Image (cartoon, helix red, strand yellow):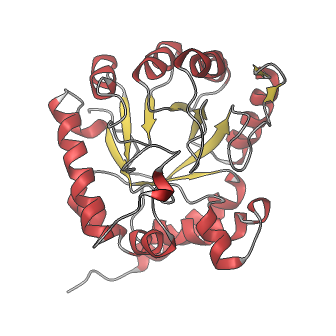
Amino acid sequence: MEPTVFSPERVTIVGVLNVTPDSFSDGGRFVAPGDQVDVPEVLRVAQALVGAGAHVLDVGGESTRPGADAVSVAAEIDRTARVVEALVKEFAVAVSIDTRKAPVAEAALEAGASIVNDVSGGSFDGRMFGVVAERGASVVIGHARTTPDRMQREISFVDVVAEVADELVAAVSAARAAGVAASRIAVDPGIGFGKRLPENLALLANLPLLRARAGCPVWVGVSRKSFLGELTGDAVEERDLAGHVASGIAVFEGADAVRVHDVAGARRAVAVGQALRAARRPSA
C-alpha cells in the first residue's frame, strides 16, 4: 500500500519544536546566546511530547509569526539540521521541517525528516515542490498570501473560505505537477497567517468545505494564536485551554492533524472531537 502523509486510522497530533529566538510562544527556549541550539534540551522536551502522545515532531528554525524578520538559509539550516538528525535517531515518530525554503527542506530531509511543512504553500520558493517530489517526502501546503513581515498589513478577502479553498486547490495542483504523489499532500488553511479574527473563525467553522475542495487531508494549527487571545483575553502562555477547544472542534469538523504545543491536553481534545464526529449522523 502506498504510504500516506497522515494515517486515516487516527487524528495525527503534531508537537511543536521551535528552535528560534523569536517565535511568538516559545522563542528562545532552545537557543542560547550566539544562536547556539541546545540539542540535549530539545531532546528532553521532545521526549515529553512523544510520551504525551505526539505522532509527529515539527521542527522550525525561522519564526513565521506575523511581523517576523526573515532568517538566512545558512542560519536556518544550522538551527534545524542537527536537531532533525538527533530526533530521528532518538524517537520512532515522523519528523517534519517547518520551512519556506527549499535548501532548508533538502538539508532536513537528508537528516531524516519525512514531511515538509511549508506555510507559504510553495509560493516563497519555487523549488520546494520539486525537492519534496525528488525525496519522496510528504508536504503540508499552508495558506499565506505574503511574507510574515507584511501579512497582517495586507489582508483582503471577499469570501475567505472560497478564496482560501481556491488557492489551496491551485497549490495542490502545482505540487502534483511537480511530481508529488497525491497521497503525500495535506493542506493547512493558515489560521492566523494574514487573517483577522472573522476570517480565522470562518475557516475553522467551514473545514468540511475546505477538505472537500482540496481533496486531501487537512492540518490545522491554532495553538496559542492571537485570535484565541482576542476571544478570551488570555495571554500567550494561558491560551492552551482555548486552543484545545478549537482543536477539538476542528477534529469534529474533519481535521486530520492538529499542530500543538501542549500535546497532553490536545490528545484529550482530539479524543472528544473524534468521538463526536463518529457519532454524527450522515447528512441527508
Total marks placed:
0
- Front-most of residues 212 and 147: 147
Relative image position of residue 123 (x, y in whole percent): 32, 37
Residue located at (78% from left, 36% from top): 28
- Front-most of residues 60 and 6: 60
Relative image position of residue 250 (x, y in whole percent): 47, 67
Quarter of the picture containing the C terminus is bottom left
- Front-most of residues 149 and 33: 149
Relative image position of residue 129 (x, y in whole percent): 29, 28
Residue located at (29% from left, 63% from top): 210
Q: Specify whether 189 is left or right of 185.
A: right
Residue 215 visible at all: no
Vertical placement of residue 246 versus 177, above or below: below
Q: Specify whether 265 is left or right of 179.
A: right
Residue located at (24% from left, 30% from top): 180
- Front-most of residues 172 and 73: 73
Vertical placement of residue 267 versus 126, above or below: below
Vertical placement of residue 283 versus 11, above or below: below
Give the quarter of the image for residue 190: bottom left
Give the quarter of the image for residue 102: top left
Residue 66 visible at all: yes
Quarter of the picture containing the N terminus is top left
Relative image position of residue 265 (x, y in whole percent): 70, 61
